[in-house]
Structures are given as structure tokens and as C-alpha cells.
Image: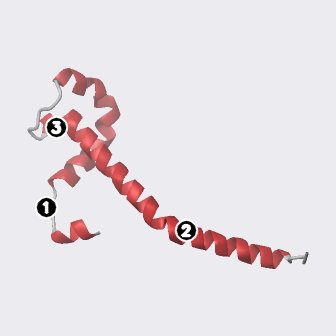
Amino acid sequence: MSQETPEKKSFWQNAKEVLYGMASHDMSRYALRTRASMEHLFILITMGDMIGVPILPPYYSLRLLPYVVPQISTWKRRLLREKDVSDAMF
């Protein structure tokens, strides 16, 4: 059994962390993108009558309104912006 120096341990620890970060970076980006699209769909279902897509009765939309108010402006901007071919690539 050989004794490893603290510098060597920190090097190997850093190397393991870098490799883990390289391997899981795409998964975390995909998870964030999936979460954003799910939130987008949730707001569309609950507050769709703002843009002319009535899906839920207004009673339920009004009950959920206090939770959705902070996200409405970014949701409307994201929904109504022009789409480009490069948006699907990245």
C-alpha cells in the first residue's frame, strides 16, 4: 500500500469531478429544457385564454393565478416571439 500525498489526492479528486461534469452536463441541460417546456405547457393550459386558447374553465385559472403571475410576462414573450430554424438546433 502506497501513501498518496494530499496534492495527488486533490488532483485525482479534481479529475473525477471534471469527468463527471463532462459526462452529466448534457443530461442536466436536457432536464432544464424539459422542465422549461413543461412549465410552458402548464401555463398554456391554465392561462391560455389570455392569448385566445380557452382550455380550462376560468374558475380554475383564477385559483392558480397567484402562483402564475410572476411567470406570465416571460411566458407571453417566449410564446409570441418569432421562431427561427436555429431555435430547434440549440
Which residue carries the number 1 mark? 82
- Going 58% across and 68% down the picture, which residue do you hit? 20
- Going 40% across and 55% down the picture, which residue do you hit? 32
Horizontal arrangement in the rendering, residue 75 relative to residue 53 (left or right) = right
Count of numbered circles in the view? 3
The quarter of the rendered structure image containing the C terminus is bottom left
Which residue carries the number 2 mark? 21
Mark 1 to mark 2 CA distance (whole Å): 34 Å
Vertical relation: 81 (above or below) 59: below
Horizontal arrangement in the rendering, residue 11 relative to residue 72 (left or right) = right
Horizontal arrangement in the rendering, residue 14 relative to residue 36 (left or right) = right
Cβ atoms at labels 3 and 1 below 8 Å apart: no
Number of residues whose C-alpha sits closer than 10 Å to that of mark 1, classed few (under 14), some (14–19) or many (20 or more) = few
Q: What amino acid type is highlighted by mark number 3? A: Gly
Quadrant housing residue 29:
bottom left
Mark 3 to mark 1 CA distance (whole Å): 18 Å
Which residue carries the number 3 mark? 48
Element under disc 2 = helix
- Foreground of the two, 1 or 53: 1
Q: Give the image location of residue 47, x and y in percent.
A: 20, 35
Q: What amino acid type is highlighted by mark number 1? A: Glu
Q: Give the image location of residue 59, x and y in percent.
A: 21, 20
- Going 34% across and 33% down the picture, which residue do you hit? 67
Quadrant housing residue 49:
top left
